[in-house]
Image: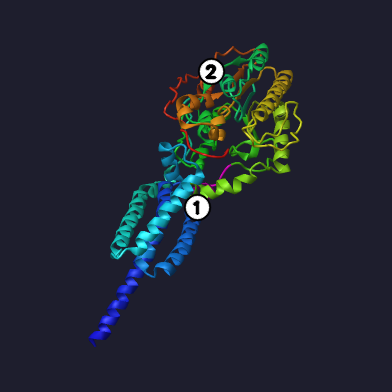
Amino acid sequence: MNSKINAIFKALTKTRKRIVLVLMVLLVDAYPCAFIYFNNIDEVNIAGAIGPFLLFVAVSAVVGMITFRIMKEGSKAGLFTAVFMMIFMNYMVIQKLINKILPFLSYLLFLILVIVLLVLLFKKINKSEADLYTWCQIITFVCGGLVLFNGLAAIPKVINEHKTVKRLDVSQYAVNKDVKNNVYYFIFDEYGGYENLKYYYGYDNSKFYEDLVSEGFSVSKNTYNREGIMTRDIVPNILNLDYVTDVNKLEKQCLDYLNQPVLYRFFEDMGYQINMINHDNYLLANGCNEISEYKGSSRKNETREMLEKILENSAFDFIDLKIRRQFKHDIDDDKIENIQVVIEDLKNAYKYTDGKPTFTIGYIQLPHNPFIFKSDGTISPDKLYNQWNKKEKYIEQLEYTNSLIKEIVDNIKANDPKATIVFQSDHGARYPYFCMVEYKSDQYNEVVETEKMQNTLNVVYNGEDGKVIDISGLSAINTWRTILNTNYGTNYKMLDEPHDFVFKWYFTDSYR
């Protein structure tokens, strides 16, 4: 009888150990997914975390089975698999931290170093005569506790999930509501400001500014949008006349502020219709009249973005760098057709006002890559659409953009001379962002480089009868506050610009 009881007890103990080992690996795999999911639970669905989790489980299953066949012991195989997955899931994080200390360490050398360390760890665990099950229990407890802690911390977000409305109140409406001149606001993504172009390209854009001044424009060569260097962090702020985004949040959380932002509602309150020219459907068109049916989308849904955010820390991002990015230079004909439709709509925006007071918002990814156009507007035949290291490609597209802006100005002034026209960009040309491979850590001044990337286009024409507006040195947000104060009698204060964002150096051996 005792022998049967002992046999049952041993079987239960063995089963319990197996459960703990499997649970340990699952919790190790789950933690990075759970951390990002719970920290963004009010904005995303769980599908974005399940995909990476299943990928990690698949990798750990393969590693675990191979390791167990060699080691013949569950605790040893489980411990090695857990440590392997910790390294695998944080591969790029570890690599970037080491590169801050050893900037000369290439991807290949780091990979060799990791492989050597894993081989040494494998041998040490395999030869160990100690009971490693205790270590497995500790890892299970720690990872389980971390997952539970993040889950509990997310409860307030879940409770308040449906109470959060990303729509700011319009703090001031127009006082002078009799002013009904049309307003055209066009955002040219990646258009470098005067200092930006001089610094990165040695390009003097003075002639462009001089031509606009001769047309009655106020220009600012020293405008900086300092809150970031990404469109998602800047455009929602401009359209809401305030700093509302957070560079540490997911893209969707920032772009939700594009849903009927303050600037649209300001003009709607005056009886304006809102027309929209929307390249790649980047803006939210709720309540707006889209001039054309725009195709494509450069926006990421929350599931895809969270999946990418989790995987970008792992060895999967290393694989992406070496395989998928080899094909990044190709674009299809639809992208060329899409931008040509947007260009024609920008040229003819004045035709769609239908005699009504109209605020026209236009967004175009130009001179942003892909570098499709030569200076004369013809399609580039070499198809080097994303090669930022070919500096002439950006400049050619910039020069075409300049001619496009001049044509837009001519068309509006000839047909709608009293209109206000505003051309701005979100950020300048982000050469270090795309070409960090060309910078050594001790040669990269993050404060200087960040500021240069934040220098933007900012020019305003206030109509043939309008008051000249001084916008020199104003951010895009403060420029719009000044326009509203000047034309509509509001009393918006100038906002202090944030200066805490810097784009840090990171090691890479390839162009982004």
Residue stretch in magenta: 299-307
**Is disc 1 surrounded by few (<14), some (14 to 19) or many (20+) residues within 10 Å?**
many
Q: Which mark is residue 463?
A: none
Q: Give the percent coordinates (x, y) of residue 198.
A: 59, 20
- Residue wearing tag 1: 48
- Residue wearing tag 2: 222
Q: Is residue 8 left or right of residue 333?
A: left
Residue drawn at the location 54% of the way across and 15% of the way down: 472
Of 295 and 433, which appears nearest the observer?
A: 433
Residue drawn at the location 59% of the way across and 16% of the way down: 219
Residue positioned most to the left = 2
- Helix, strand or loop: magenta stretch: helix
Hey, which quadrant is residue 483 in on the image?
Answer: top right
| Amino acid type at mark 1 | Gly
**Is disc 2 surrounded by few (<14), some (14 to 19) or many (20+) residues within 10 Å?**
some
> Which label's residue is closer to the chain start, 1 or 2?
1
Of 163 and 296, which appears nearest the observer?
A: 296
